[in-house]
Image (cartoon, rainbow, N blue to C red):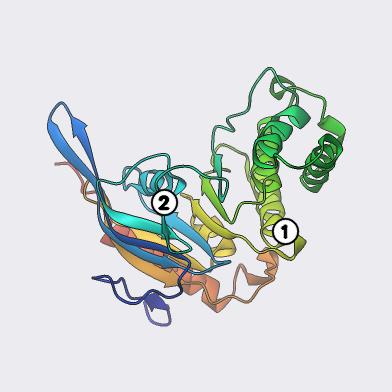
Amino acid sequence: MNGIAIAPVPEDAAAPIEEYMSIRGVMKAFDTPAGKMIALRDINLDVRHGEFITFIGHSGCGKSTLLNIVAGLSRQTSGEVTLNGKPISGPGPDRGVVFQNYSLLPWLSVRENVFEAVDAVYRTKSGPEKQALVDNFLDKVGLAEHRDKRPSQISGGMKQRVAIARAFATHPEVMLLDEPFGALDALTRNSLQEELLQMWTGDNQTKTVLMVTHDIDEAIYLSDRIVVMTNGPEAVIGEIIEVNIPRPRDKRAILHTQEWTKIKEHLLYLLMVAYAHPTKE
C-alpha cells in the first residue's frame, strides 16, 4: 500500500533507537504434552521514552506473552529485555499493568483497591498524602462519587476505570495494557480511550505505553507505532507501522483523513490477507 510509513524490522542487535527500552532476540517456548511449543521467535524492538506502541495480530500470536515478559511476570526462554539499560528480571514499580479482567479485590472498596497499590509503592508518604493521591486519580477517571462502593456494585466500565487509576496512581515509567477495553461496549470504550490519553500525558510526565489490542481503529487512534505480529506458533514481528497523525487527536476529525484510511486499509490487508489464518480444507 503506497504512502504507508513502515519501519524496518531489525534482523539483528543493531544500534537502538534510544537507550530506553530494548527487546533483543526474545524467544519464548512452553513445554506441552506434545513437546516444546515456541510461541515467540526472534523478537527485536526498541521503544522510545514517552512512546505509545500497540501490538495487534490474531489470537495466539504471542502479544500478551510478550507483554507479560516486559512486565516481568513471565521469563523469556532466550534473549533480553532492558529498561534504562538494566535487564528486566521480574515485576517492579517502574512498570504498571492493566489487564482486561480488572483484577480488583472484591472485598475492598474502589478507594481501598487503589490505596493498596499506592501504599505498596510509596512507603515514605504519610497516610493523608496517599489518600490525596488516590482521590486525585479517582477524580481523573470520574469515580469520585463511587469511591466507597465495592467492585460488585459498579459496572464493567467503572471497574476498568479503577484498574487504570490504580496503575497510574503509582506513577510507573511504563504502562502495560493487555486489551483493557476489550470487554466494554463501544461508548464506554471510546470514553476510556480519551481518559487514557489524558492520563498518558498528565502531570507533565508522559509515560511510555505498550498496549495489546484487537481493535484496528483503537490502534491507529492511540499509537505512535503499531507492531503487527504474524500468526503463531513461532510468531515474529511482521511489520512496524508509523502513525504520522499529529497530536492531540480528535477522532471525529481524523477518522476519514487520507492518513487514517491508508493505515487502516494496510492493517486490514495484513490481518485479512498477508497474515490471515490458513483456511482448513
Q: What residue do we see at 41% from left, 51% from top?
A: 88
x and y, in percent, of residue 216 in the image: 49, 57
Q: What residue do we see at 46% from left, 49% from top?
A: 214
- Say which quadrant the C terminus sits in: top left
Does residue 30 appear in the picture of this structure? yes
Of helix, strand and loop, which one carries label 2?
A: loop
Q: Quadrant of residue 80?
A: bottom left
Asked if the residue at tag 2 contacts the one at tag 1, i.e. Cβ–Cβ closer than 8 Å, the answer is: no
Q: What residue do we see at 38% from left, 74% from top?
A: 16
Q: What residue do we see at 21% from left, 46% from top?
A: 279
The residue that label 2 is drawn on is 88
Task: Give the side of residue 235 with respect to residue 169, left or right.
Answer: left
Counting other residues with Cα less than 10 Å from the Cα at mark 1, is it few (<14), some (14-19), or many (20 or more)? some
The residue that label 1 is drawn on is 198
Counting other residues with Cα less than 10 Å from the Cα at mark 2, is it few (<14), some (14-19), or many (20 or more)? some
x and y, in percent, of residue 18 in the image: 46, 74
Of helix, strand and loop, which one carries label 1?
A: helix
Who is closer to the viewer here, 243 or 199? 199
Who is closer to the viewer here, 155 or 17? 17
Q: Distance of mark 1 from mark 2, alpha carbons?
A: 28 Å
122 is higher (above) or lower (below) than 94: above
x and y, in percent, of residue 133 in the image: 80, 44
Q: Type of residue at label 2?
A: Ile
Does residue 157 appear in the picture of this structure? no
- Sooner in the amino-acid sequence: mark 1 or mark 2: 2
Task: Give the side of residue 42 with respect to residue 116, left or right.
Answer: left
270 is higher (above) or lower (below) than 149: below
Q: Quadrant of residue 113?
A: top right
x and y, in percent, of residue 120 in the image: 65, 35
